[in-house]
Amino acid sequence: MISARVTLTQPLSNHRQFIATSGTGHHFLIDDAAGNTGAKPIELVAVALAGCTAFDVINILRKKRQEVSGYEVKVEADQTPDPPQVFTQVRIHHIVTGTDVSPQAVADAIRLSEEKYCSVGAMVKLSAELHTTFEIVSAMKSTLVGA
């Protein structure tokens, strides 16, 4: 079971800042655009999607023995203009840095994440179309020469 709790920080003011607590005991602030002291809840969905697919993809690439020295996932999402303002289009871009990283291995890892493993992506796909791209950045091996 997954659980979470949010607690209003300033009940006697007009602010909408909350302390969020995950079921595993981690804390962070959430807020609205006016207060701007933490992420908006909808932003956390984008973060969760990036994190979910990143966990899957790096795990798969490591199992495929790819030499990954850096990895980043960027997510941008468009929303409907009217409430509940769900995501309609989501762009996910994976940036994999490494030595001799196979484009096919990256494509396969992303596909497995999207089709089989990423629970957040499966939920987001109920309202949005996902568009995924990736790039591979070559990492140059550096050699320390004399001291």
Image (cartoon, rainbow, N blue to C red):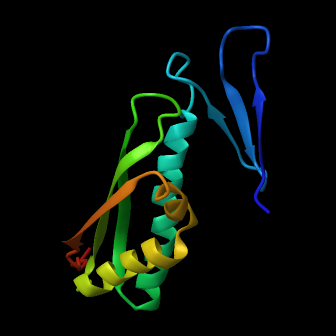
Quarter of the image for residue 64 reads bottom left
Q: Residue at x 46, y 66 (%)?
A: 54
Furthest toward the top, the residue is 13
Q: Residue at x 78, y 51 (%)?
A: 25
Query: Is 108 rendered above or below residue 45?
Result: below
Quadrant position of the C terminus in the picture: bottom left
Query: Is 14 rendered above or below residue 102?
Result: above
Q: Residue at x 70, y 28 (%)?
A: 18
Percent across and percent down for residue 140 are: 20, 76
Is residue 144 rendered to the left or right of residue 3?
Answer: left
Comparing 79 with 109, the one in front is 79
Q: Residue at x 35, y 86 (%)?
A: 66
Is residue 77 rendered to the left or right of residue 99?
Answer: right
Percent across and percent down for residue 135 are: 22, 68
Q: Is residue 93 visible?
A: no
Quadrant position of the N terminus in the picture: bottom right
Query: Is 92 rendered above or below residue 99?
Result: above
Q: Is residue 79 visible?
A: yes
Furthest toward the bottom, the residue is 64
Quarter of the image for residue 109 reads bottom left
Instruction: Give the total number of marks visible in the rendering.
Output: 0
Is residue 144 rendered to the left or right of residue 117?
Answer: left
Percent across and percent down for residue 106 are: 32, 79
Comparing 115 with 58, the one in front is 115
